Structure formats: C-alpha cells, structure tokens
Amino acid sequence: MRPDIAALVGKMARREAGAALRAAPRVEFGREGPSVRVRLVACPSCGARPRGRDWSPPFRDGAPPGPVLRMLACETVTARALLPIITSVGHAPGLRRAEFETRGLTWLEAAPLGLGPALEMVDEAERWVTDPAGARGRTLPASTRRHGPGPAWPDHRERLVPSFLSPHPAVPPELELLYAQELRAAIAHGYEQAQKEQSLL
C-alpha cells in the first residue's frame, strides 16, 4: 500500500473519530433540539431513487430553515455522524444554512480521478470540520451504510457493515480494513484522553 494513500486514510479516520467524540448539545426536556434537513439524491450506481423515509431527530425532511445534508438514496449515516454539522453551526453563523453532502456523493465525483487524487479531493472537502473558513467543500466526515434491510439475513448483515467512502464497493478491502483499524484506535485514544481529563477535575 502506498504510504501517501495510507496517510490519507488514517487522517480521514481520525477526523471521523474526532467528530464522533464531540459532545452533543444539551436540549431541555420537551424542547426541540437542533436538526439537519435531508435531501436524498438518486444514485447513478444502483439506480436508487429518492423515496420517503421515517426520520428520527436530528434528521428532518421538513421545512424549517437550517443546514441541509445531501445523501444518496441508497445510503444512510448515523445520527451521531451529524454532530460536526450540529456543533459547528452554533459557532459559525455562515454554516447555519449551508449545504453539506456525504462522502458517498463526493466520491461519485472524485472516483474518476483515480484512487490517490480522489482520496485527496474527499479529504480536502471535509477539512471544514477543523477549518470552516479555509475548506473548499462541505463533505460530512462519516462512514456510510447501504439503506434498508435486505430480503435475507446474509444480505442484511452485509448492509450493516459500514464503508468509509460509499454504500457500494469503492476501494480495495485492505483500505476499508485500515480505515476501520485507525478509526477504532482513534476513538479508543479519545476516550482515554477524556478519562484522564476527568480524573484531573
């Protein structure tokens, strides 16, 4: 594996881990918390078309103005994956009505460039998480899964396994494995650091 590819994959995994470890905003009982509207996009790879979904907070498909996440009709991300959007809009007014997209959508545009340049494009597009003013894109740094259960358990089980780039096979399996290892290690390290900080209080 090329060192530059491995470095990019590791950086993206650590960015996702850092985003997932952010503290969710406190919401008073009975009050409506922050939300992100979802706009589903037809998938040219599998032909999935936008259809209605039952969304739970912080996802919404309703009308209130706010940040929007574009995602492929065949994919889904976790609620925790939205933390970078939810926490950032409170600190950066320019993002309050911004439009974001999943890695799956960014990858569709980037993939024809070849593996290295495509990963660089995705990496650059999600730098807004740490550099809101300097990044050139608004890609959500989060793994994705295929949406909807399959007709049989083996197919359903396969859909539960996340990919760091696309709901469809997109990169060599060894890159998916490296990403998963880096993500787990970064999350474990983040929890350890948080426990150390708590013990000092």
Image: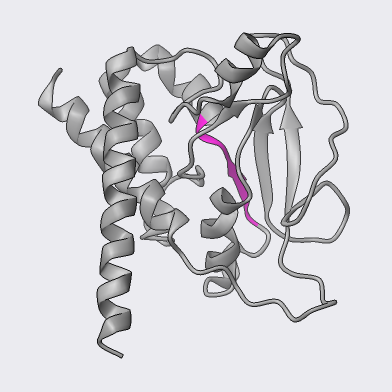
Image quadrant occupied by the C terminus: bottom left
Image quadrant occupied by the N terminus: top left
63 over 122 or under it: above or below: below
102 over 82 or under it: above or below: above
| Residue farthest bottom in this picture | 201
Residue 31 position within the rendered picture, expressed as x and y whole percent measured from the top left: 82, 77
Q: Nearer the viewer, residue 55 or 185?
A: 185
Left or right position of 20 against 86: left
Q: Can you see residue 42?
A: yes
Left or right position of 146 against 170: right
> Which coloring applies here?
one colour
Please name the residue shown 34% across and 52% down the image. Answer: 187
Q: Can you see residue 120?
A: no
Q: Nearer the viewer, residue 200 or 63?
A: 200
Left or right position of 187 against 106: left
Q: Nearer the viewer, residue 151 or 120?
A: 151
Magenta span contains residue 164 = no
Q: Residue 130 is drawn in which quadrant? A: bottom left
Please name the residue shown 60% across and 63% down the image. Answer: 86
Please name the residue shown 33% across and 28% down the image. Answer: 119
Left or right position of 185 against 52: left
Q: Give the residues in magenta.
A: 98-103
25 over 119 or under it: above or below: below
Q: Residue 21 is drawn in which quadrant? A: bottom left
Q: How many marks?
A: 0
Q: Nearer the viewer, residue 141 or 91?
A: 141
Residue 26 position within the rendered picture, expressed as x and y whole percent measured from the top left: 63, 77
Residue 45 position within the rendered picture, expressed as x and y whole percent measured from the top left: 61, 9
Residue 18 position within the rendered picture, expressed as x and y whole percent measured from the top left: 37, 56
52 over 166 or under it: above or below: below
